[in-house]
Image (spheres, rainbow, N blue to C red):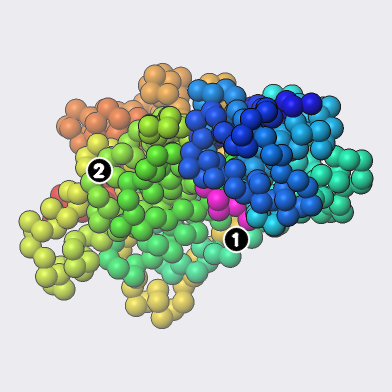
Amino acid sequence: MTLATTRSIALVGIEGAVVDVEADLADGLPAFYLLGLPDASLGESRDRVRAAIINSGESWPSRRITVALSPASLPKRGSSYDIAVAVAILAADSKLPAKDLGELMLMGELSLDGRLKEVRGVLPAVLAAARAGIRRVIVPITNVQEARLVPDVEVIGFRSLGELIAWFRGLEPPDQLPIQDQLMPDVKVPLDLVDVVGQHEARRAAEIAAVGEHHFFMVGTPGSGKTMIAERMPSILPELDRDGAIEVSAIHSIAGCLSGNEPLLIAPPFIAPHHTATRSAVIGGGSAHPRPGAVSLAHCGVLFMDEAPEFARGILDALRQPLESGFVSVARTAGTAKYPARFLLVLAANPCPCGRFSGDGRACTCSSLMVRKYLSRLSGPLLDRVDLQVYVEPVSRVDLMGNLRGESSAAVHDRVMAARERSASRLARGGWRTNSQISATVLRGEFAADARGMSLVHRALDEHRLTARGLHKVLRLAWSVADLEGHDRPTIDDVAQGYALRTGAQRLVGAA
């Protein structure tokens, strides 16, 4: 036989497409041709595959070898096609049985000595194979635990090409890694809100943000606890369900930051890019092939941007699209990738360039113009999409020396879960998960606050202290407060609290 076909997966964003790897051996001068829009790393597979086959004790066919990756119009990248190419060539050379190769998905990189090396994106690739009806996959042994997260798919791991060849010839596969329960691993949350001294208003705002997945902006002096509160947000958020855990783990697998020992991410991710990060690192992209950025790695978790005014203006404004839509599209010459990006945004900023503008302002060395200019780097349209805007007071000597620690994350988490359970049946009728997703029309109708509460926000709108978007965000906050308090409908107090938390930082900026 001079023609054989194996199957692999090409990833475009988080979605995968089945690729037929066809190998044809023809008479003529020895040569190797690789077709189907391969990138540079895939084009180098010719030398890797040849060395791996020879070092595995097999002979390299001295013929004209043509390998086609179909569909030809789909760009392919990376070294994960090495195993599929090697098996297709050996099957075309009658070294391996070609029967039933189409029922396998092969994925992995080959080293020159024939070892199978770990690759990125195995989880979304196996998900794509399962959707295409492929029920058996072959991956490097180090990717087995990740691949096994997909149900109803048989995963076989190999350490070398020699082991894989022996298995095709009828020998038993090598010892597999023990099957572990990946669905409910221990959730390790080392940071706890109990470490935060004082800051009752900021802690309350964080709790409300966790109830309704409201975006959160903190302004305060250095050392006031903004970063501590942000880092502990995942500890009070609900754990990911199975579908969410697999989706988040798939994104991290594509980015290459998924642990082989614990491939399923149950805890909400916490991503904190540095303010010098590029737009591609935050939003996603790359020079040729799109890759997920921080906004996608934070999917179903928290994206924390400390020293937010120090980020480039274009990066901050680019956040507006994923904040509204829940996904980000990255277009490059090799194609367009779409990544999920539904995250809880937490912004933190100093009140001025020197960071000491607080109280009577005597310690601050900045002019009022410098203060306004500094915080104006955060555009109005961006802040209008942030629900909670809170000023974080400096920690007082009484709180610090008295060691007045607040509640633990476990206690706050229990209240958050109780509030979410209270709202679950109400939100399910409209197809929403959290209060931040309630539509504006329903907020003015069926889900309106009581008469006094609606009068408060209408008056703020008439006096131009709230935009239309701000009015709806106050009402969504009021519903989260009501769920925490056990109210069937937001009261005037719930709406007032939502309004105060919505405009706290704005009043500080205005006073500057």
User: Residue 381 sits in which quadrant?
Assistant: top left
Of 101 and 138, the residue lying toward us: 101
Of 428 and 36, the residue lying toward us: 36
Which residue is at a point 39% across and 55% down the rendered structure image?
A: 273
Q: Residues within 10 Å of mark 1 (few under 14, many from 20)?
A: few
| Magenta span main SS | loop
From the top left corner, tell me how far across and down residue 217 is, in percent: 33, 50
Q: Is residue 236 left or right of residue 104?
A: left
Residue at numbered disc 1: 189
Task: State how far apart marks 2 and 1 are (Cα).
Answer: 33 Å
Q: Residues within 10 Å of mark 2 (few under 14, many from 20)?
A: few
Mark seen at residue 314 = 2
Report if residue 261 lies within the magenta region. yes
Of 224 and 247, the residue lying toward us: 247
Mark seen at residue 84 = none
Which residue is at a point 25% across and 50% down the rendered structure image?
A: 312
Query: Quarter of the image containing the N terminus?
Result: top right
Q: Is residue 343 visible?
A: no
Q: Which residues are magenta?
A: 254-263
User: Residue 336 sits in which quadrant?
Assistant: top left
From the top left corner, tell me how far across and down residue 506 is, in percent: 23, 47
Which residue is at a point 79% across and 41% down the rendered structure image?
A: 155
Of 114 and 336, the residue lying toward us: 114
From the top left corner, tell me how far across and down residue 489 is, in percent: 48, 31
Going from N to C along the chain, the mark reached first, 2 or 1, is 1
Q: Is residue 338 visible?
A: yes
User: Residue 367 sits in which quadrant?
Assistant: bottom left
